[in-house]
């Protein structure tokens, strides 16, 4: 579970665009969890508590520094891979250089920007990246849990708790995170309307269709792309927090082992 979802960079970004204040984060774990858990969730967690107690009585194997390093490296590779995917899908695609330009022209002529894109295109890209993050993060989280299950009783108990909390809290997150594109759409419209009055008409006598197709994306779309990138990177950090916490606990157990 993210250490404090309400104070995350993702929430701060979205709140700034919608002009909503973010309340102070609760420091007590029970207070932070109470809005996310219902009666049936409490029953399931109580049953999980019994399993956690039993798993702590079984012998385990002390984790090694090599194992901890491998998990940390896997997390960093995942972070870099997803960060690169976010940058690639939020940056404009450079237009190919004209074939008949001279060497001097090719070297000194700026690349044409990607034409203006509609919101459905950005929405599809955002949702595709959300699916990619969800799939890749959950896959590594499963591998880390298995490493914890095979280690000390304390780590086994932590993995059991993560499974129990994940079944409840992840379901809540799956309902909240898909709403992010809707908030981002409002930002899209906000920026588009702010610059609508500055849109220039095509030159007199020019073909309107050709002028529209050749027109580069207006400056507001560059700003929106940056906003979309910032939100995706902030969402990535929220998704990685539980995974990073498990790996940190594994590393701490290595340090405390004789």
Image: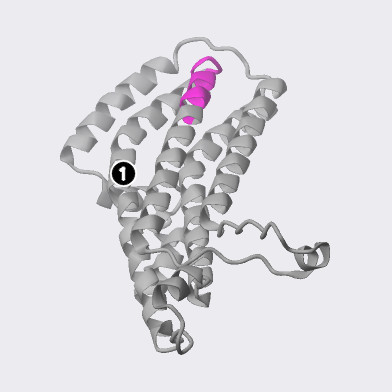
49 sits left or right of 249 in the view: left
| Vertical side of 156 occupied by 35: above or below | below
x and y percentages locating residue 185 in the rendered image: 34, 65
Please tell me whether mark 1 sits on a helix, a strand or a loop.
helix
Quarter of the N terminus within the rendering: top left
Residue 254, quarter of picture: top right
Locate residue 34 relative to residue 96 in the image: left or right: left
Confirm whether residue 215 shows in the render: yes
The residue sitting at 33% across, 30% down in the picture is 164
Q: Nearer the viewer, residue 170 or 44?
A: 170
Indicate whether residue 148 is drawn in magenta.
yes
**Rendered residue at 62%/31% (across/down):** 74
Which residue lies under the disc numbered 1? 174
Is there any visible trace of residue 154 in the rendered image? no
Q: Which residues are magenta?
A: 141-152
Viewer-side residue, 63 vs 106:
106
- Magenta: predominant secondary structure element? helix
The percent coordinates of residue 166 (x first, y second) are 36, 34
Compared with 226, 155 (above or below) is above
Q: Residue at x 37, y 64 (%)?
A: 118
Q: Quadrant of the C terminus?
A: top right
Residue 167 versus residue 14: which sits nearer the camera?
Answer: 14
Badge 1: how crowded within 10 Å, few (<14), some, or many (20+)? Answer: few
């Amino acid at each position: 579970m993210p250490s404090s979802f309400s104070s995350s960079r993702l929430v701060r970004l979205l709140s700034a665009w919608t002009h909503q204040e973010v309340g102070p984060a609760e420091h007590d774990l029970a207070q932070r969890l109470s809005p996310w858990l219902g009666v049936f969730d409490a029953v399931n967690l109580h049953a999980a508590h019994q399993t956690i107690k039993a798993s702590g009585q079984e012998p385990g194997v002390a984790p090694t520094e090599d194992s901890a390093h491998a998990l940390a490296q896997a997390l960093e590779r995942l972070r870099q891979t997803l960060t690169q995917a976010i940058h690639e899908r939020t940056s404009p695609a450079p237009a190919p250089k004209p074939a008949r330009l001279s060497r001097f022209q090719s070297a000194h002529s700026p690349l044409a920007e990607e034409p203006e894109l509609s919101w459905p295109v950005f929405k599809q890209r955002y949702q595709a990246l959300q699916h990619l993050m969800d799939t890749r993060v959950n896959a590594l989280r499963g591998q880390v849990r298995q490493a914890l299950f095979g280690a000390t009783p304390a780590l086994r108990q932590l993995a059991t708790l993560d499974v129990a909390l994940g079944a409840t809290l992840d379901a809540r997150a799956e309902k909240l995170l898909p709403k992010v594109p809707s908030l981002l759409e409002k930002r899209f419209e906000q920026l588009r309307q702010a610059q609508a009055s500055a849109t220039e008409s095509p030159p007199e006598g020019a073909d309107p269709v050709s002028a529209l197709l050749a027109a580069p994306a207006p400056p507001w779309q560059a700003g929106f792309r940056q906003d979309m990138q910032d939100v995706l990177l902030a969402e990535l950090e929220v998704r990685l927090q539980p995974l990073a916490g498990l790996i940190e606990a594994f590393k701490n157990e290595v340090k405390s082992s004789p």
